[in-house]
Amino acid sequence: MRLFIPTIGTHLKLLKDWNFLLIPEYRNSVIWKAFGYATSNSTIYDFCHENPRDSILPADTILSVDRIYIRKGIGDYDSLTFRILDCPDPRFRSPKKKGTLSGVARFWVKLHDANVMDIEVI
C-alpha cells in the first residue's frame, strides 16, 4: 500500500464502480435529487427525516477533490468533498450545457467511503 493524500483540485478517475453511503444532508441535496432519492418538490428540511442511502457512481467518472476535513479527536466528521467533472451516467449531466456536467454536482462522503475508491490520478 502506498499513502496518497490528494490536494484540493486533484482530478480522480474511478477505475471501478464506487459504492458509498450518501448522507442526507443539505450539502448533498443536489446529488441526492440526481440519484432520484427526492422529488423536485423536496426541500433541504425533508432530508433530516431520511436515512443514508447506498449509492453508486460508475467507473470512468471523473471527480475533483474540493475539500478535505480531518480533525483530531472527532473522526465521525472526517470527510472529503468532491465535484463531478465527468460521468457516464446521464443523471449528472447539466441540461443547460449539452454534453457537459453541472458544476453544482458537489457532494461529500465520509473518509472511510473515500478510502475504498479505485482511482487513477489524472
Image (tube, grey):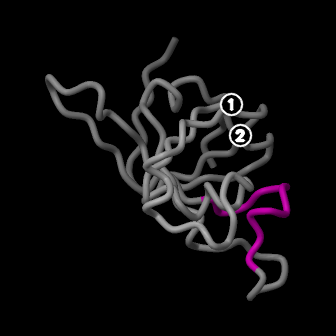
Q: Secondary structure at mark 2?
A: strand
**Vertical comparison of 99 with 64: above or below:** below
**Residue at position x 19%, y 33% in the image:** 71
Q: Which residue is mark 2?
A: 14
Q: Could you say which quadrant of the image residue 87 lies in?
A: bottom right
- Badge 2 crowding class, 10 Å Cα cut-off, few under 14, some 14 to 19, many 20 or more, is some
**Vertical comparison of 51 with 90: above or below:** above
Across and down, in percent, residue 70 comes to 26, 35
Q: Secondary structure at mark 1?
A: strand
Left or right, residue 59 beside residue 62: right
Q: Could you say which quadrant of the image residue 103 lies in?
A: bottom right
- Name the residue at the bottom extreme: 96
**Residue at position x 69%, y 64% in the image:** 39
Viewer-nearest residue: 72 or 45: 45
Mark 1 or mark 2, whichever is nearer to me: 1
- Name the residue at the top extreme: 1
Q: Where does the magenta region start and end?
A: 84-94
Label 1 to label 2, Cα distance in Å? 11 Å
**Hey, what amino acid is under mark 2?**
Leu
Q: Answer with mark 1 or mark 2, whichever residue precedes in sequence.
A: 2
Q: Are marks 1 and 2 in contact (CB under 8 Å)?
A: no
- Badge 1 crowding class, 10 Å Cα cut-off, few under 14, some 14 to 19, many 20 or more, is some
**Hey, what amino acid is under mark 1?**
Asn
Across and down, in percent, residue 10 comes to 49, 52
The disc placed on residue 19 is 1
